[in-house]
Structure formats: structure tokens, C-alpha cells
Amino acid sequence: MKTLYSSANQKEAQQLLRALQRAGIPATAAERGATIDILLIQPGYEATAKEIIQAFKDNPEEFTEQAPLFVAATSPSLWRLLAKQAGIVTFLVFAAVLLTALMQWVIAPEWTISSLLFTPLGMPELSFQQPWRFVTPILLHFSATHLVFNLFWWWYLGGRIELRYGAATLALITIVTALVSNYAQWASSGPLFGGLSGVVYGLLGFVMIVTWQKPTHSLSLPPFLYIFMIGWLLLGYTDILWVNVANEAHALGLISGIVLGFVFRIRDSRSTNQYK
């Protein structure tokens, strides 16, 4: 964790901490003698946090309890704040999924679905003449709940991975986990499936491995998030859930993400040792 601000004024520190947290910045406070330090938990938010702190210094009266929406008035626009929490690949996939939902649900449902399924309807074999189909099922979603759930996790995990490892790495993880999870689901149930869930579980598996026993890693997640996601995956194999679940896509997406996580962890370890 990195110290963003230090103050001997407890009230001032509390106001700033609440301001940062209301803006979505993962920050906390720690006492150091008579001083209170504001600490940043994840380094990807540092630029945005510094802008808010500067606004705090310039106009402290805007940060009172009576002005809970100061962020919208004095800090960068919501768009700029979001832009600092993700990268270009995160944005592009997010936008592509939303555009696909519009096409699928409103404009041209049959055409959209038939164009993006793993294989054309009625064709049991792979179609290598249309290679985009091996990836495009991740854009299809068949309910609003399914869409919102996947987009939330994509933004939360994908954005953080892109900030830490770069756009090329997120693109690589997305393509590999999409290929593996889509093929696994197609081989198990046929072409009538869709969703970003396999990739989301791939991102989860990747984060799980690169942060293992590294609590200060910028991608570290609270344990309850792993419990929730793995629990949901396991529930999919029971009759408890009321929705159809792409179990094989989830499971193989997770496994492929774990494998990639090991690859990057080994690479990072070698890089660290090289410069010791």
C-alpha cells in the first residue's frame, strides 16, 4: 500500500478518506503516532486519487458531510474517472457486449444470434472458414441479469488486470479463455450458448494464481469473492439453480486462466530474480 496523504488533523483525514471512498478509490487509514496516513490499496487508482486530494486541498469546504456529491462537481467527469479504472481493451469488449445486446434484443435478433454462435445453426462440425465464431459467443447474452453480472465482473477484473499488466495481456487472456471455454461448452452441449462468463472465470483464475500468497499485490481480491464465484460454479452442477448455466465454459475458463496465471507468475519471478 502507498501513502497518499498524511495529517495530524483527525477530522480532516476522515473527510478525505470518505471522499476517496465515495469516488470508488480503494483507500484506508492507519494511525502513525499522532499522524493519520491515508493509504491506497490498489496502485491503479493513484492518478485519480491524487486529483481528488488536490481538489480537497484547493476547496476543503466542498468535502463536508453536507456535500456528499462533491466528486461530480469538482473532480473529473464520471467518464474520466471510469477511464482511469480500466484500459482500451476493457472498454472495447464492454462496448461490444452492449452493442451486441442491442442488436440481439432489439434490432436484428435472429441475424445477430446466428452470426455469432460457435457454429452456424444446424452444423454439428467446426467451421474454420468463419474463425470469429470461436470467440464471438462471449458477446451473446440471453437475459438482463446474465448481461449485468458478466459486465460487472469483466469491468472489475479485466480493468484491473489491464492496468497492472497492459492491454496486450488482457487481450491474450480474453482470447485464450474464450477459445477454451467456448470449445468446451460447444463439445458438451452444442452451439446454443453464449456469455462472457467463461472469460470472467478465466480472469478470476488468472488473478487467483498471480496473487497467491501475495497479499500486497495490486490485483489481490478479498477471499469472500473467490468463495462466491467458486461456489456459484459448483452450484451450476446441481439442480438448485433456476437458470441454465454453461458449466463447462465456467470450469474450463477457470482452468485456462489458472494456467495463464502460472505462466505469468513464473515470468514475473524470473524477471525479479534477474535483477536481484
Image (tube, grey):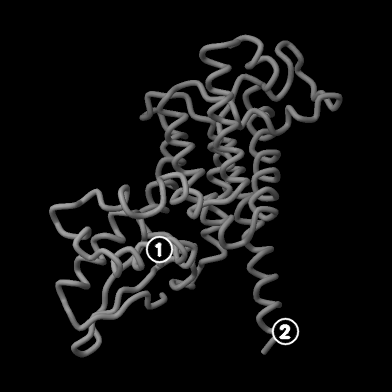
Rounded to the nearest angstrom, the CA distance separating label 2 from label 1 is 36 Å
Residue 129 lies in quadrant: top right
Q: Give the percent coordinates (x, y) of residue 124.
A: 75, 18
Of 241 and 16, nearer the camera is 16
Q: Is residue 44 above or below residue 121?
A: below
Local crowd at mark 2 within 10 Å, few (<14), some, or many (≥20)?
A: few
Task: Please state if 125 lies on the left or on the right of 8 as rendered.
Answer: right
Q: In this view, does 22 lie above or below 249?
A: below
Query: What residue is shown at x 80% (from left), y 25% (from top)?
Result: 126
Q: Which of marks 2 and 1 is nearer the N terminus?
A: 1
Residue 120 lies in quadrant: top right
Query: What residue is shown at x 21% (from left), y 90% (from top)?
Result: 33
Q: Give the percent coordinates (x, y) of residue 105.
A: 51, 15
Task: Please state if 231 lies on the left or on the right of 169 as rendered.
Answer: left
Which residue has dot 1 on it? 51
Of 220 and 29, nearer the camera is 29
Q: Quadrant of the C terminus?
A: bottom right
Q: Specify the amino acid type for callout 2.
A: Gln
Q: In the orientation shown, which residue stands out farthest toward the right?
A: 129
Q: Is residue 242 above or below residue 234?
A: above
Residue 118 lies in quadrant: top right
Which residue has dot 2 on it? 274
Please report contact status of discs 2 and 1: CB closer than 8 Å, yes or no: no
Q: In which quarter of the image is the N terminus?
A: bottom left
Task: Please state if 211 lies on the left or on the right of 184 as rendered.
Answer: left
Query: What residue is shown at x 56% (from left), y 50% (from top)?
Result: 203
| Secondary structure category for the residue under label 2 | helix
Task: Please state if 247 lies on the left or on the right of 226 as rendered.
Answer: right
Q: Specify the amino acid type for callout 1.
A: Glu
Query: What residue is shown at x 59% (from left), y 42% (from top)?
Result: 199
Q: Nearer the viewer, mark 2 or mark 1?
A: 1
Of 6 and 186, nearer the camera is 6
